[in-house]
Image: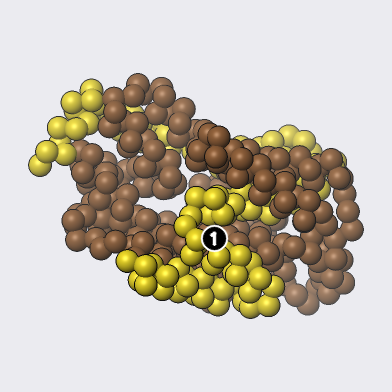
Amino acid sequence: MAAIRTLLPVLLAVLPFGLVYGAVAVQEGLTVLQALGFSAAIFAGASQLAALQLMGIGAPLWSVLLTVFALNFRHVLYSASISRHLGAFSGGQKALAFFLLVDPLFGAAEARAAKRRLTPAFYLTYAILMYLSWQLATLAGASFGELIEDPEAFGLDFVLPVYFLGLVMGFRKRGAFYPVAGTSLAVSVVVYWLAGPPWHVSFGGLAGIAVAAAIGPQKRPAEAAREGRAGGAS
Amino acid sequence: MNGEALLSDAGWSTGSIWLVILIGGALTYLTRFGGHILISLLGTIPPRASAALDAVPAAVMTAIVAPVLVSGDWPERVAIIVCAILSLRLPLIAVVVIGTAMVAGARALGS
């Protein structure tokens, strides 16, 4: 099935990340149930780790929550963009789809929607398997944290950057791709250097989007091709 | 285990930890459907906003990848550029496997 095939390489990166999160959470003093609670309710690894770090240094509750919100703010952009492709989804399916909207899923769903109609079957299969994997990895990390070998030795921390790179290159035929990607690249690097992660994602992304808005609508070959063969494709 | 002490020493009770989990989860869900609500409120999307939304995937994902060029070591920097070129021709899964293997190989040789 297409969703599972697309998800498999991502799991190579997500499973070790979940194991690391689970192990760190228990080392910081969370119970296994609390570690799972974070993964189940928030389902966003970077913000879960940041919350743990802040809690560990005794930061106040509001600042932990503000950090979680700020780190996850990029999802507003994802949900604005992806909501245009959810025509085949019922209300309940949309509510679930947004709850499970994580970075790789957003990329995969946009890439899919550029080629054919995005179906609930594709989206939710990917989303639910990813969610369950995250919970299982958290549970395993929290239970057997000490057993983890160094995932970096196998280059697994490099899987997600390459995956996102590959997805980005798939959008290169869209109008204004090079000015948009070039601006995002430059701003992201500068912000990463000045302010550190995770701000580079939101600011770099917003800068590229601003360029696209400034340039305005363009003829898109991919869109034209899709319209040309619409009907049989879905 | 000594971990038990860390969060309670820092002033975190069981109740306040669950508060972070529940409110943090609610705030995150808000960001995940917030964009959808904004788009729905707009009704019809003006062409310029539509062009901006079309740029979201490329803009955000480029921003996610970009720091590899400055934060990684040379194997990562070279690998990401090679992968950018490879992905003009090869399918995604092949590029992921080749890129990961390059980095793992360089680290095995380097250590």
Rendered residue at 55%/39% (across/down):
A193
Q: Left or right: where does residue A25 sit relative to residue A155?
A: left
Rendered residue at 85%/66% (across/down):
A221
Judging by colour alone, the chain drawn in yellow in this rendered image is: B
- The quadrant holding residue A59 is top left
Q: Is residue A115 above or below residue B7?
A: below
Rendered residue at 21%/43% (across/down):
A27
Residue A44 visible here = yes
Q: How does the figure colour the protein chain or chains?
A: by chain
Task: Between residue A195 and residue B16, name the one nearer to us.
Answer: A195
| Colour chain A appears in | brown
Residue A227 visible here = no
Give amino acid for label 1.
Answer: Arg
Q: Where does residue B92 sit, x and y in percent of width and height?
A: 59, 72
Rendered residue at 42%/56% (across/down):
A131
- The quadrant holding residue B3 is top left
Q: Where does residue A196 sit, x and y in percent of width and height?
A: 50, 38
Task: Between residue B9 and residue A122, name the one nearer to us.
Answer: B9
Q: Where does residue B5 sit, x and y in percent of width and height?
A: 14, 32
Would you call the spot at circle 1 few (<14 residues within 10 Å), some (14-19), or many (20 or more)? some
Q: Left or right: where does residue A175 sit relative to residue A45?
A: right
Q: Where does residue A202 sit, x and y in percent of width and height?
A: 60, 40
Q: Left or right: where does residue B59 sit relative to residue A134?
A: right
Q: Left or right: where does residue A39 sit relative to residue B11?
A: right
Report which residue position mark 1 lands on. Answer: B77
Task: Between residue A183 and residue B34, name the one nearer to us.
Answer: A183
Q: Chain of mark 1?
A: B
